[in-house]
Image (cartoon, grey):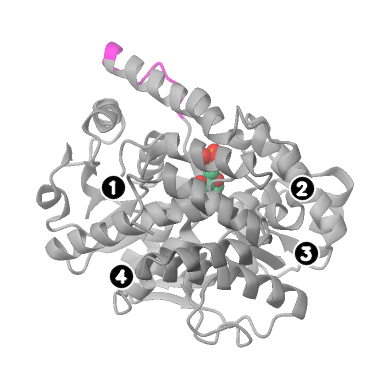
Amino acid sequence: KQRLVVVGSGSTYTMGMMMSLIAEKDRFPLKEVVFYDTDEQRQERNAKATEILFKERYSELESFSYTTDKKEAFENVDFVFVQIRTGGLAMREQDEQIALRHGVVGQETCGPGGMAYGLRSIKDMIELVNDVRRFSPNAWILNYTNPAAIVAEALNREFPKDDRLLNICDMPIAIMISYAKILGIDVWDIVPEYFGLNHFGWFTKIYDKEGNDLTERLKERIIDTGFSPEDEAIANDISWQKTFDQARQMLIDFPEFLPNTYLQYYLYPEAMVEKEDPNHTRARQVIEGRQKHVHDLCERIIDKGTAREEELHVDVHGVFMVKAAESLAYNLGERFIVLVENNGVIPNLPANAMVEVPALLTSSGPKPFSVGEIPTFYKGLIEGQLAYEQQVVDAYFETSYQKLVQALTLNRTVISATKAKEIVDDLIVANEKYWPRF
Ligand code: G6P
Ligand code: MN
């Protein structure tokens, strides 16, 4: 039985993740769950509601606690799930708005917003990994923190020998849920082939467990009737709906492989800018939507002393995280799309690139499948994006203003060096409390 710590437990995703722990409790039995967050107040609301939830639905659990003390949290821990957001949603809104003010994609992980967020996340993530390692040298650290590409690159440089640190993103599985609905099969029966960087990749093949190739049928269905994802979180969210609608257009324009939805920010940047309202970006929608919902939900559970009257949904991104942990803990060797160092997996990309590919998760870490050489179009796109990501991390470690401007100049959402410099200057002011001094 495992001792699990959730870092960033004040997150709006925490309740959904706790439902996933409950859903998976037979396959991934826990002895103890600990919440850790730097923001005591945010954490407390989630924690008090979770305490009630666990009493009602997770009686096998021996202990649940929450703390802001590192030693208390990280001593003797088996698994650490990390989902932090340095600067919170307030800074996410800044990131999105500053970019849009310059007529550039305003997004959490893509373009200038992603760079800004990356430069905030790196410092806290390095500190966190050091903190965990001080108390639990062998704990598995499963990191969800965004922007995953930049965070993974920075952590791989800072902790090159740490082989129990795994960066993962739920977007491939979120997309696969839609594929599964379209194909009428269970998402866990889909066997994907995929390559790319985080939020910058393509499904090349979709098989079922029996080995049937469903790729062409899937493409036809998407082109004919669109995505209409039935995953509740997405179906109820207009912004995600639009994202999937555009994914259909992307497939019509680039029918060779099935693109990750995030590629639309790089392939159609003007259109993505146009549909944004700078005064109501995604951060605002999350603050007024999901955050408020979770906030009210927790307050009600705490007030009533029970969660029985609430409609609680198992969160897919949580289930994905738990299933990945399960596979690592029990050496199940199940296939997940994760971030690993390339090392020849894609031979015509640099060996040190952090790539997103399918891998078997075993107790000695991820075992990626060889992808083989990728065609010029994808290689070109990836190399540009990879250079940008590595340049951001270089800029961080060298505190180089020059390199920041170069990084944004490399990014497809920016390109203009004049704009890159203007945006960097604005971001430096906005991120004064979080960034190193450039
Ligand atoms: C997906 C991505 C995450 C991203 C999230 C944003 O799950 O994989 O990297 O953070 O979407 O969702 P939101 O609802 O906060 O805009
Ligand atoms: Mn992601």
Q: Quadrant of residue 220?
A: bottom right
Q: Which residue is mark 2?
A: 270
N-terminal of the two: label 4 or label 2? 4
Percent across and percent down for residue 296 are: 40, 18
Quarter the N terminus occupies: bottom left
The range drawn in magenta is 303-312
| Image disc number at residue 164 | 4
N-terminal of the two: label 3 or label 4? 4
Looking at the rendered image, the disc whose residue lies closer to the viewer, 3 or 4, is 4
Percent across and percent down for residue 392 are: 48, 65
- Identify the amino acid type marked 3: Thr
- Identify the amino acid type marked 2: Glu
CB at disc 4 and ligand 2 closer than 8 Å: no
Circle count: 4
**Magenta span: chief secondary structure:** loop
Q: Is residue 330 above or below residue 348?
A: above
* Label 4 CA crowd tier, 10 Å (few <14, some 14–19, many 20+): some
Percent across and percent down for residue 157 are: 36, 75
Looking at the rendered image, the disc whose residue lies closer to the viewer, 4 or 1, is 1
Residue at position x 39%, y 68% in the image:
154
Q: Are marks 1 and 3 in contact (CB under 8 Å)?
A: no
N-terminal of the two: label 1 or label 3? 1
Q: Which residue is mark 1?
A: 7
